[in-house]
Amino acid sequence: MGVTQRLKGQSAVVTGASSGIGAGVARALAREGAQIIVNYAGHPEGAEKVVHEIETAGGKALAIRADVSQEDQVIAMFAKTIEAFGTVDILVNNAGLQKDAPFQNMTLAQWNAVLGVNLTGQFLCAREAVKEFLRRGIVPERSRTAGKIICMSSVHEVIPWAGHANYAASKGGVMLLMKTMAQELAPLKIRVNSIAPGAIKTPINTAAWDTPEAEANLLKLIPYKRVGVVEDIGAAAVWLASDESDYVQGTTLFVDGGMTLYPGFDMGG
Ligand code: BGC
């Protein structure tokens, strides 16, 4: 348990939390006193490990299986969450995947799988969370808002990405989904923001950093000359979930070591 407890007594659903950024965010929110639903689609061992880590540190967590692209599974996950924890205060829309292919070879199945999880999944989870936020309303002892949604986007909400048309399209979609929800839900005292990670060391991009040559190549794209770690994203998520960011609405927080600063222009132009 952390000492600051900025999220004390709050319940958070973190999708795709059995590994990578989701697992890091789940641990970070738990350290601040939130009880966590560790959602996973395919790896119960990973999810149970995260639950165990949180419990060992004195926190509370529960693993729930749901494919976020499936409406019935998302509805069931929120029902179980409310049954277990009473309510939901925070949603971290994190679940995401890549199915890369040269554009002319990209199959409809690859397109649909990525859009289904990365974009439709964020819509479905946010909709269920918002229903619960509105049902419960503001509980001043816990937070100034009725609820917080954090969308896990990517630097590829603004950087085009050859060979990844489905992924870039999904993250571009997340950007305007997030902003539209933020505009619509602000008067209802629901805060919606995104985090746009750059290159973070996780299973999704192992090939980009797991050899010295690959890492050196990747660092050319990162002015800060460090590949990110999940703790970088966990810290941003805690801040966006807490009342410290109470006046932050509809924004994308880039946590990317400067990847979006056009590093190719550091000389000349
Ligand atoms: C992708 C990673 C990639 C990073 C920077 C992320 O959204 O999932 O594979 O390394 O963007 O390009």
Image (cartoon, grey):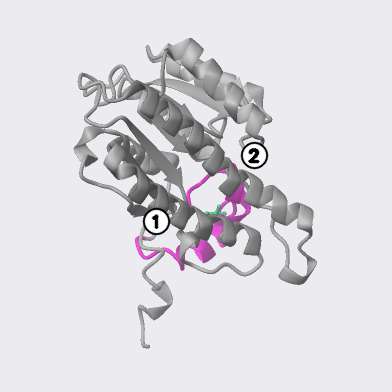
The quarter holding residue 56 reads top left
The kind of residue on which mark 2 rests is: Ser
Label 2 environment density (alpha carbons within 10 Å; few <14, some 14–19, many ≥20): many
Residue tagged by mark 1?
256
Say whether mark 1 is within 8 Å of ligand 1: yes
In this rendering, position of residue 71 left or right of residue 240: right
- Tag 1: residue type? Asp
Which mark sits nearer the N-terminus, 2 or 1?
Answer: 2
Q: Is mark 2 within 8 Å of ligand 1?
A: no
Q: Is residue 140 visible?
A: yes
Q: Position of residue 91 (x, y in %)?
A: 43, 33
As drawn, 90 above or below 251: above
Provide residue 146's location: percent of width, then percent of height: 30, 29
Start and end of the magenta stretch? Answer: 199-224
Q: Nearer the viewer, mark 2 or mark 1?
A: 2
Query: Which residue is pictured at 52% across the width and 35% down the height?
Result: 125
Direction from residue 121 to residue 126 in the image, left or right: left
Residue at image point 20% right, 37% down: 244
Q: Quadrant of the N terminus?
A: top left
Q: Which residue is mark 2?
A: 69
Return the residue nearer the eye: 227 or 130. Answer: 130
Distance from label 2 to label 1 (Cα)?
A: 27 Å
Is 219 magenta? The answer is yes
The residue positioned farthest toward the bottom in the image shown? 269
